Image (tube, coloured by chain):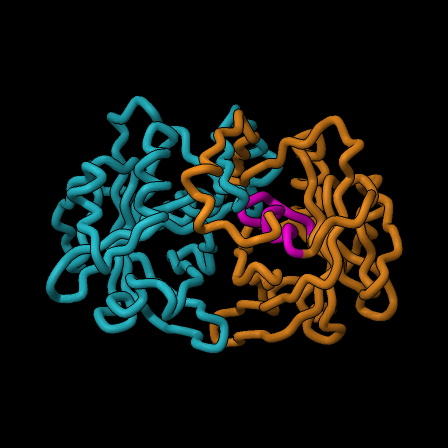
Chain colours: A orange, B cyan
Amino acid sequence: MKKMQLGKAFTLLEPGPVVFITTNDGKKNNIMTISWTMVVDFTPVFALTTGPWNYSYTALRKSKECVIAIPTVDMIDQIVGVGTCSGADTDKFGKFGLTPVKGKHVRPPLIKECLANIECKVIDIVKKHNIVVLEGVAAYFDSSRKEQRILHAVGDGTFVVDGRRLSRRKMMQSKLPEKV
Amino acid sequence: MKKMQLGKAFTLLEPGPVVFITTNDGKKNNIMTISWTMVVDFTPVFALTTGPWNYSYTALRKSKECVIAIPTVDMIDQIVGVGTCSGADTDKFGKFGLTPVKGKHVRPPLIKECLANIECKVIDIVKKHNIVVLEGVAAYFDSSRKEQRILHAVGDGTFVVDGRRLSRRKMMQSKLPEKV
């Protein structure tokens, strides 16, 4: 897993993947699966929606840190498994064969098996809407990985796999930030 | 275009499509292209990120209404075209051959050529982060359309097309809202 230019990290979330969020409550690591995320700025800033009903929320709110880890299609059963049990009674890293890797800026771990990881600081929580605002402080990408297709959750129990990629870079040149 | 159950409308945004947002400033209709959206609740509530740098923002802020319209892969050049010119000096419906259709609850129009449309009310603007919070009040889906594959913007001028769909409905049954 190599460092990725921070100015490109928003491109990991912009296509709308289902992702893992790792947290650490001071005692142990945990993971949740979510799809409710959005890019808020190129710098990068991200938002996600979660709340008190979610076991990871307390760790996120108190520690103000997390890692966004991006899994690929071959990890679908880990994605669904992590999303359908609770960190209250489960060591999800152990149960789903995921390997925590120490980050540089935050205590929650990167996930070794994932295509990409973004270390994040919580910069705000908009309580009224359960929106957590994150600033990415370091990003990593595993370019040696053969499988790079991400998964998009539909929300009805089905997932769509990345298909072909079309380029309109020329038409969009005026709109792209400098670093991408 | 037929009415879609409102409780299912979040599944239109959850997979992370690039979308059109239509607005009306009291004088004319406009359209913008965005990818920075997120589901905030099943009811449905959505968030999007935009701000004063965007011509549509004033109409969105003043009228407190918009339509989220979901285009498909065959509309890629309309998506990029709408996203790379401004409503300040362009009639985007005319220029890109898109047909406005009157909605029932809001003044901004649905887009006839799109796969789905969601009429929305702006329920809040979190100015600090340029996050606009929307409540969906009616949704429509064109099931007669042959092309139903949506596009995911990567943010670097490339777009990923929907590939195959995998189901994990059985594993996820406990987590799915009643209506999907």
Res A77 quadrant in image: top right
Q: Position of residue B113 (x, y in %)?
A: 23, 35
Can residue B88 be seen? yes
Determine whether B138 is above or below B135 in the image. Answer: above
Q: Residue at x 57, y 59 (%)?
A: A42
Q: Nearer the viewer, residue A172 or B120?
A: A172
Res A172 quadrant in image: top left
Q: Is residue A10 magenta?
A: yes
Quarter occupied by the C terminus of chain B: top left
Q: Residue at x 62, y 36 (%)?
A: A150
Magenta-highlighted residues: A7-20
Can residue B119 be seen? no
Determine whether B174 is above or below A118 in the image. Answer: above
Horizontal side of B160 relative to A137 (left or right) equals left
The mark total stands at 0
Q: Nearer the viewer, residue A141 or A114?
A: A141
Quarter occupied by the N terminus of chain B: top left
Q: Position of residue B112 (x, y in %)?
A: 19, 38
Q: Position of residue B88 (x, y in %)?
A: 23, 60
Q: Position of residue B22 (x, y in %)?
A: 25, 53
